[in-house]
Image: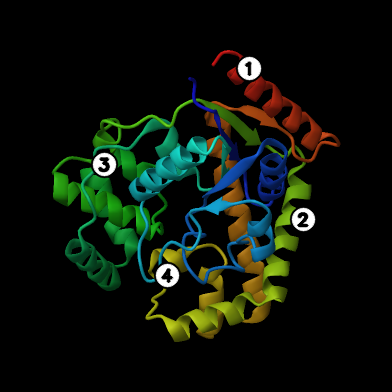
Amino acid sequence: MREIPAILLMGPTAAGKSVLALSLAERFSGEIVSVDSAQVYRGLDIGTAKPDAATRARVRHHLLDLIDPTEAYSAARFRRDALAATGEIRARGRVPILCGGTMLYFKALIDGLSTLPSADRELRAQLDAQAAREGWPALHAELARVDPATAARLEASDAQRIQRALEVWHLAGVPLSQLQGRRAERDDIGPLIRIALLPSDRARLHRDIALRFETMLASGLVAELRRLRERYALAPGMPSMRSVGYRQAWAHLDGDIDAAELHTRGIAATRQLAKRQFTWLRRTEATSFDPQAAHALAQITSFVGERLRLAAVTA
């Protein structure tokens, strides 16, 4: 018997992915698997637009609230968790709907993982200490000497990726750019229905992004971060605190920026994130829909229904 196709619902932030996923799940007896690198953290609710209790009561969600914000979560772990959740959903005869905006995670699902060395805490601490002394641009220059291909696509301020690339160089002895082309043995996620949401009106998307961040601020984003800092031994360099919104709210709580600058920087960072998501989506294989179109929901629902019917007929 052929497996039930999994729906990959990909799109930039504020494109309406969550509302669409909920509608598809209710229409086609589905369950939602979060593809969001920040929603895995307990307590990061407002700034990640995490579904509330009422929404989770309507449709079952997976890969939410997995770890504390002091911990790290990798693409490799996501892939294992997502494959397990997808298998369990299919075993119940339901449709897996993998929805989110973390494109690295979608890439891990579709293409598998590179054969890269695991993180080394001691080495990362050494690189952080070096960056504190010399600055990340100096480490970017060092990366340019040992792995020019990777350095060329990274900003000199991209601390997380510079650190990882240098870590791989020290641990593996070869550049990250070489290792990324080698794929490990992998389990297949099975048949897919790939959907990319690509809003046509960028100005409207920018307005939606601004409204989304303003709603988060009004809902208590800063207070949420304050409570998290009181409960956990957090630091601004932790992956959870590098998330858009939390990074800017941290600077505000530290007194580095005022409320107006928090508003400006949060919206700007979200727009930059959406731009990166657009770039990735245009390069990936998927059926594209404009979520801003008048009949987008009906079009996408019809498309999914037809693909699921075809899969059932050929099973």
How packed mark 1 is, by other alpha carbons closer than 10 Å (few <14, some 14-19, many 20 or more), is few
Q: Earlier in the sequence, mark 1 or mark 2?
A: 2
* Residue that appears at 79% across and 35% down: 296
Q: Position of residue 247 (x, y in %)?
A: 51, 69
Badge 4 amino acid: Pro
**Mark 3 secondary-structure assignment:** helix
**Mark 4 secondary-structure assignment:** loop
Q: Are marks 4 and 2 in contact (CB under 8 Å)?
A: no
Badge 2 amino acid: Arg
Q: Earlier in the sequence, mark 3 or mark 2?
A: 3
The label nearer to you, 3 versus 1, is 1
Q: Earlier in the sequence, mark 3 or mark 4?
A: 4
Left or right placement of residue 313 versus residue 250 in this view? right
Residue located beneath label 1 in the image: 310
* Residue that appears at 13% across and 44% down: 173
Residue located beneath label 4 in the image: 69
How packed mark 3 is, by other alpha carbons closer than 10 Å (few <14, some 14-19, many 20 or more), is many
- Give the distance between the C-alpha atoms of the residues marked 4 and 2, in whole angstroms: 30 Å
The label nearer to you, 4 versus 2, is 4
Residue located beneath label 3 in the image: 176
Q: Position of residue 211 (x, y in %)?
A: 75, 62
The label nearer to you, 1 versus 4, is 1
**Mark 2 secondary-structure assignment:** helix
- Give the distance between the C-alpha atoms of the residues marked 3 and 2, in whole angstroms: 38 Å
The quadrant of the picture occupied by the C terminus is top right
| Residue 50 in sight here | yes
Q: Position of residue 43 (x, y in %)?
A: 51, 72
Residue located beneath label 2 in the image: 207
Q: Earlier in the sequence, mark 1 or mark 4?
A: 4
Q: Earlier in the sequence, mark 4 or mark 2?
A: 4
| Residue 140 in sight here | no
